[in-house]
Amino acid sequence: MADKMQGMYIHMHWGYNHPYAARTWHMDDWRYYLSGIKKLGYNLVQIWPMLDTMPLPLTPSDEAHLRKLQHVIELAHREFDMAVWIVLCANTMGNAAAADYAFEERPYFSTERRINPADAAARQKLLATRRVFLQPLREADGFSIIDSDPGGYEGSSVSEFVQLLADHRQLLGELRPGILLNYWMWQGWRDPDKPPPVGEAYLAPWREALRGLAELNPEPWGLLACCREHFQVIREIHLQDRTLYFPYGTIEDEPSFPLTNCDIPRIARAFSPQSPPAGDPANYPGGVMANAQSHCLQLPGTYLFAQFAQGQRPDEASVVEFAERLIIGMGKHVAEAWCALSSDDQDRVLEARNRMTAAHAPIVRVGDLSGLLLDDPARFLDSLVMQLDCVSAALAANAVLDRSGDPLAAARELYRATTAWADRVGFRDYYQGPFRRLLHPVLARLAERLAHGAHLAAALAEFDALQRRHGPERHGAFVRLMAGFKAALGE
């Protein structure tokens, strides 16, 4: 396997429908997806398998999930010569409610708890539990441990976090010598339920953790750096040679309501020479990592990230060429649909939808990258049309509000299109990202104009409050929002 990595993070936090949520993938889905990203230049997948919510003893669905991941690791190694890293949270484990859920439906925030790293007995229980969970995954090439969110603990010292890294280094070495240990720098070791500090205090947890890790020197080990502040501290301590660049959220915010992004400027900024030090590959000789949440939707971003990471400068024309390698004869229509999804021009959105439906024949010819479609081009094309319907309905409602017309009919169509897409993907929880930036301003305006708009205003206020809270309330947030919308329609 190559020394310089180009990775994709497979995130399994949020549970929703197959195949949009990676935690629902079958082995065939994994084979298709790996075949596609391998052809784009990816040689690494990093998977968060939510071991942190598993009970002991394991449920049958957890056992099946671990067996599947074991086969995924074998598949990646044997068929695609790809490395596999597994993500762990530093101090989280399943709580008493975890066994009440099958793995595919398990809500994270309702089934995890954070242990106090100062409690030696709790720390040993965490490690003993993880030994059971990690045994089937011992052929993974590396394990990445994030500092907080999820994880962290009120009043815990950074030295206790470094001790957790040391504990995991010993555990991994006992499972299989030579496994890479990565420190995924994120929010710093702290209480994630409180606002982050400012100024030098913001950098201090990373600085202390890196100094402790350098002194520990738990070979083999590396660093995942996500932002400018991470690189600043890494340079101070001269650890650039261990660093992989992980510009989290470049392709897709997380959590996001599933909606395809095709944002060339956003991905370009992650690799821009005007954005030092991230724009200078010398600062991350270990390679790069992308992330997505709904991988079978985020195909343009997956392609664009690979191109920029390899020093190319793609444009809309190259996106057409990429789409043509998915479905032959549909490249220009698919690419235009992707671009229209981020447009505020309703005519463009409607034209893209009409071209998609007119060109979509029952029989399609797939291209060499069709693995990214997970062997279902019809589902892929239908999903694009449904997303265009959502965007079109939001723009139409805005247009009616701009004209001070009666918004009820437009609001009903927006509710219909949004819930139809939501039923398809099954996403139920709190989210950020483009879908929220599109939908929520329209809902706020409708709340002021509809006769029963107070229901919608209250639902929006409840949703917005969740930005400051990480807990079980985040689960089902979209369902509650749509209930408020429905009540605002008088239904």
Image (cartoon, rainbow, N blue to C red):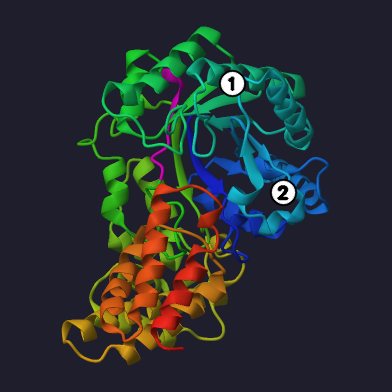
Horizontally, is 243 left or right of 177 in the view?
A: left
Compare residues 16 and 79 and report the one nearer the observer: 16
Verify CB contact (< 8 Å) between mark 2 and mark 1. no
Amino acid at dot 1: Leu
User: Is-magenta flag for residue 425?
Assistant: no
Local secondary structure at mark 2: helix
x and y percentages locating residue 233 in the rendered image: 34, 20
Q: Residue furthest left?
A: 403
Residue marked by disc 1: 165
Amino acid at dot 2: Ala
Mark 2: few/some/many CA within 10 Å (<14, 14-19, 20+): many
Closer to the chain start, of discs 2 and 1, is: 2
Magenta residues span 241-248
Q: Which residue is at 47% across, 32% downward? A: 191
Q: Is residue 81 visible?
A: no
Residue marked by disc 2: 98
Compare residues 177 and 186 and report the one nearer the observer: 186
The total number of labels drawn is 2
Q: Which residue is at 60% across, 71% downward? A: 376
x and y percentages locating residue 467 in the rendered image: 40, 52
